[in-house]
Structures are given as C-alpha cells and as structure tokens.
Image (tube, rainbow, N blue to C red):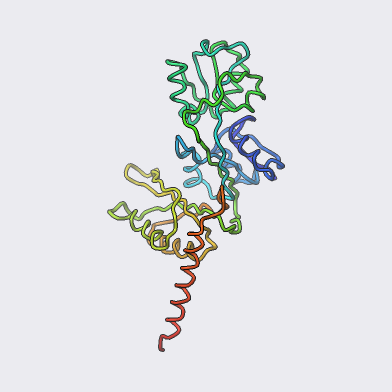
Amino acid sequence: MRIGFLGPLGTFTEQALLTQADLAAGELVPLTSIPEVIAATETGEVDLGFVPIENAIEGTVNATLDTLAFEADLLVQREVVIPVQLNLLAAPGVGLSDIKRVISIPHATAQCRAFLRRELPGVETVAANSTAEAARLVGERRAPDEAAIGTALAAKLYDLDVLVTDVEDHPGNETRFLVVTRDTIPAPTGHDKTTIVCFQHADRPGSLLSILQEFAARAINLTKLESRPTKRGLGHYCFMIDLEGHIAEELVADCLRDIRSKMADVKFLGSYPAAGERGPAARRDAEAAWQAADEWIKGLRQRIGE
C-alpha cells in the first residue's frame, strides 16, 4: 500500500500516521500540500491519503475540507485523533533571546500565539507548507536568529535543538486526521461516524432547521456542524455535518434519505470507524427503538385493505 501524507518527512501528519501500525507498514509517500495528497489519492498515484481535518484550538483545516467537498470524490476510511506537542526548534548554538523569526505552518503558529507573545514579543512569523518544511528550512540555513515550530521527530531529522517543548497554548490540544481512498465504505464497527455535505436549493429561513429536525427526530447525535461558502458568491453556503452512526444502520439511512429529498444535493464523504472508545448505549438504544417502530409500521400496513 502506498500512503500519501503531508510532507516532507517529520511533519506532525507523519507522526500521527505512524501511530497506525497497518499504515506505518506501507510505503509512505510525502507530498508537498494537502490538495496534492488528495489529488494523488483520487488519481491512484497513492492508495490512501492521510490528511489533517480539525484541531481542537484552531478548528477545521479548510484546505482539507474544501478539497474533499468541492474538488475530489473520495471516501473517508477512518479517523485518527492524537494529542498535539509542538516544540520550538533551532540550530545548535541558537538561544531563545537570539530568535527574530519563527517559521511554521500557519495552523501551528496560531496554536502558539500566547507563547510567542510572551516569550518572543515582536518576532516575525513566516508561513511554511508544513511544520517539517519549516524545520528543514531552519536546518538547511542554520541562521543564528531563526527558529521553527515543529515536532521532536523533525528536530532529529534536520539536526536541530529543541529549545522549548510544549509551546502550544492550551493543554489537551488534539488534532484529528482522516484516511481517505477512492471507492470503499468500511463495514460498520458499532462505533462509527458519517460525514456529509448538504447543499441547499436556496438560502431561506428555516433551511438549516429542516436538516437538524431529521436528526433530532431520530435521536442521532451530531459531533460537528459547520457552514462553508460554496464558492458561488457571498451568501451561498453549504453545511458540513459529522454524525454518529453508519450508513448501514437503518436509522441513519432513513435520516439521510429524508435529508437528500429536501436538498439540492448531499455529498456523502463516508461512514467510518470513529476514534476513541466504543459508542454510547444511547446509540444502540436509538437503533433498537427505530427497528421496533419499523416493525410496528409494517404490521399496520399489512392490515390495509385492497
């Protein structure tokens, strides 16, 4: 298996990928950007793509969500959630007081705003495509006033010192990643998520409520709800929704069927194993209740005269 991920070697994405034994055993292919990872997966250059989708501090990684929603036709295979540890890296001999410029991917820099303001006031922040690219640049240039925000793995790869560990501003910071491929929906596990994107016919009062009512009526829990511009002009939005459950479950299938009938379009991004512990008893109870109600309806319909 060839697995594409956001490179170069030493990114936080690679570190997350290596927590998955089956993926780590494959041929790992570092690529230069998130859209490139997704495009390589869609064309078959790689079998799987591994991309970040959400951070507990900075929220959605828009490059991932928008590319999956608008530019690619892929299905999520699983999610991976790992705690974030970001470090300040510099060439040997560089001290904290020497640093005038910090390089990293903007999503990582934003997770360290308070640290930078407190410890490096007035420092220039420079954008890179990834934490590992930032570390590579600092390692190659060996500038006496330059540092990167990145992983301990990147420090080893690019011969840098870790000046400060855990520079992220909030404890409990986590990042969520998705494994994507072309045409397979994983079998249900009993602890799954489904991701969809809903496109409205028109922006009108109550349009979001009409979607949410379908979930509420079936006691389906939503774990994420976000609006995104559809790229067709101001005021045009779609809704990205993560929900508990699998398309194989009748309760979920019935809900999505009704939502699809109300929308201009619904893009299905996958039903896949959720990270963490197994799903709550409420999920199973809701499914059992739906099955009982379905049997009740079938019984009534059998009594309809010709």
Number of numbered discs: 0
Residue under the image location 52 percent in, 37 percent down: 174
Q: Is residue 259 left or right of residue 191?
A: left
Which residue occupies the foreground of this view, 32 or 96? 96
Q: Position of residue 13 (x, y in %)?
A: 59, 36
Q: Position of residue 2 (x, y in %)?
A: 68, 43
Which quadrant, please, contains the C terminus? bottom left
Q: As displayed, is residue 112 above or below residue 39?
A: above
Q: Position of residue 38 (x, y in %)?
A: 56, 42
Q: Residue furthest left?
A: 205
Q: Position of residue 299 (x, y in %)?
A: 46, 81
Q: Name the image quarter holding residue 11.
A: top right
Q: As displayed, is residue 76 above or below residue 148?
A: below
Which residue occupies the foreground of this view, 214 or 36? 214
Which residue occupies the foreground of this view, 200 or 59? 59
Which quadrant, please, contains the N terminus? top right
Residue under the image location 52 percent in, 53 percent down: 193
Residue under the image location 46 percent in, 65 percent down: 254
